[in-house]
Image: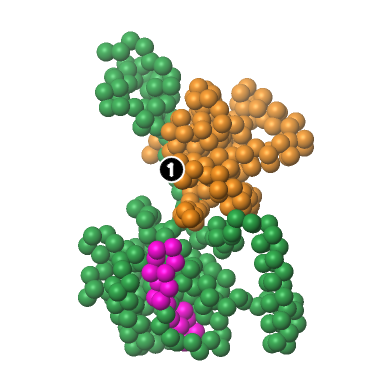
Chain colours: A orange, B green
Amino acid sequence: MRTRPDLVEHLPRLRRYARALTGDSNRADDLVQDTLERALAKLDLWQPDSDLRAWLFTLMHNLFVNQIRVRRPQETAMDEAVDEAVSGGQMEALAARDIHAALARLPEQQREVLLLVGLEQFGYAEAALVLGIPTGTVMSRLSRARERMRQMLASDPSILLKLVK
Amino acid sequence: MTDNMHEDELHAYVDGHLPETRRIEVEAWLAAHPGDAARVQAWAAQNQSLHAAFDSVLNEPLPLNLVRATRRPALAVPFKAIAAGLAMLVTGLLGYAIGVGSGAQVPAAPTAYMPRDAAIAHVVFSPEMRHPVEVDAAHTEHLLAWLSKRVGTPLQAPDFSAQGFELLGGRLLTSETGPVAQFMYQDRIERRVTLYVRRALAGNTETAFRHATENGVDVFYWIDGDFGYALAGQIGRQSIGELADAAYRQLATAPARP
């Protein structure tokens, strides 16, 4: 019988990603808990020689996407409004006071890529695997995410100072 | 000198995914293209501020429900239902037994979980190179004052220098019996051991020295007065035993401070 991998050592990093992704510590830990439950239920499907961390992030991604799908009906209108404003309106951009606010205003698909690459330090191909998309799509989302973040953060001089320091 | 630059390569430069030769070429390109250089600088700053904003999560005490959730058997749902039923039953019985009714909050027997919790805390934090402790040994006085205040008793960090281990520092964790102090020690070849200290269940008079192995981590644990201690490490059962013995002697003979 093969030994079960220890999931606990992945907890701190799953929690970090979930926190950044959801922007809310309770929602983040709920997402981590759901991920662990799914992981334990499906552990037999995990290939022992593959990357357990990437697999756990894949499970979390799938759960996150499902959550968004459920929430979407109430939030769609607002998200679209925000998208419009960020790309066009200076006022909206000025409201993005810090990295938390800027992240929250990023479309989820771009936020995921930015966080997997920039925070969790996955390679591009690994991030593509986690998200189930081609590497080329990772690159285009990353590019859009970083440019949008740059616009939002650059419009707040105090943030710029903090970043440059 | 390169005469074109794909945007993907600018990202790969920021994320450190370029081979050395290409990295140097990208740097030359950036020196000649201030617009690209500004973008690359902003992207790198985003990575930094993401770490600045969220790395602290790595340091937070792990919520016990999540630690538990990593340990459930594969048949998660039925087990969960059974466990919930049992927990209610046990809570009810205990509540009845101590005459405060089934609505009272009754802590689970802390010694049952202590070696496992100590081993998990050891496994999670001892490999950390950047954040092994929250307060380092250079601030021992502050560390002891802070953890003593949070755990609710004057704490001492045992001295393991005779065994070749130096105090690295400590951190605060959580458990079902309240706050936990974790002290971390390291020897010359960077092997680490952790001492886990938390309040024991009132009325527990068990003082025996016990050994457990949890996922390859040796744990020696004991109860002294109102507190439970567990020393965890992967340095061999005998070495951990010697350290635990030293800790026990020092903590037992330490003058109680008001």
Q: Secondary structure at mark 1?
A: loop
Where residue B64 appears, as percent x and y from the top left, is 56, 63
In the drawing, does residue B213 fall left or right of residue A142? left
Q: Exactly how many numbered labels are in the figure?
A: 1
Quarter of the view holding residue B156: bottom left
User: For the residue carrying disc 1, how many other residues have a C-alpha within 10 Å: few (<14), some (14-19), or many (20+)?
Assistant: few
Residue placed under numbered mark 1 in the picture: A49
User: If the image is split into quadrants, where does the C terminus of chain B sit?
Assistant: bottom left
Residue type, numbered disc 1: Asp
From where the camera sits, is residue A76 visible? Answer: yes
Q: Nearer the viewer, residue B134 or B75?
A: B75
Q: Residue at x 56, y 44 (%)?
A: A45
Q: Nearer the viewer, residue A89 or A29?
A: A29
Where residue B181 appears, as percent x and y from the top left, is 44, 70
User: If the image is split into quadrants, where does the N terminus of chain B sit?
Assistant: top left
Seen as rendered, the residue at the extreme right is: A73
Up the image or down, B149 lies above or below B67; here it is: below
Q: Chain of mark 1?
A: A
Up the image or down, B65 lies above or below B48; here it is: below
In the drawing, does residue A66 fall left or right of residue B23? right
Where residue A71 appears, as percent x and y from the top left, is 73, 39
Please report the bounds of the magenta region as a residue range: B211-228
Seen as rendered, the residue at the extreme top is: B3
Q: Residue at x 30, y 74 (%)?
A: B238
Secondary structure character of the magenta stretch overall: strand
Q: Nearer the viewer, residue A31 or A4?
A: A4
Q: Residue at x 64, y 42 (%)?
A: A63
The answer to if A27 sits in the magenta stretch is no
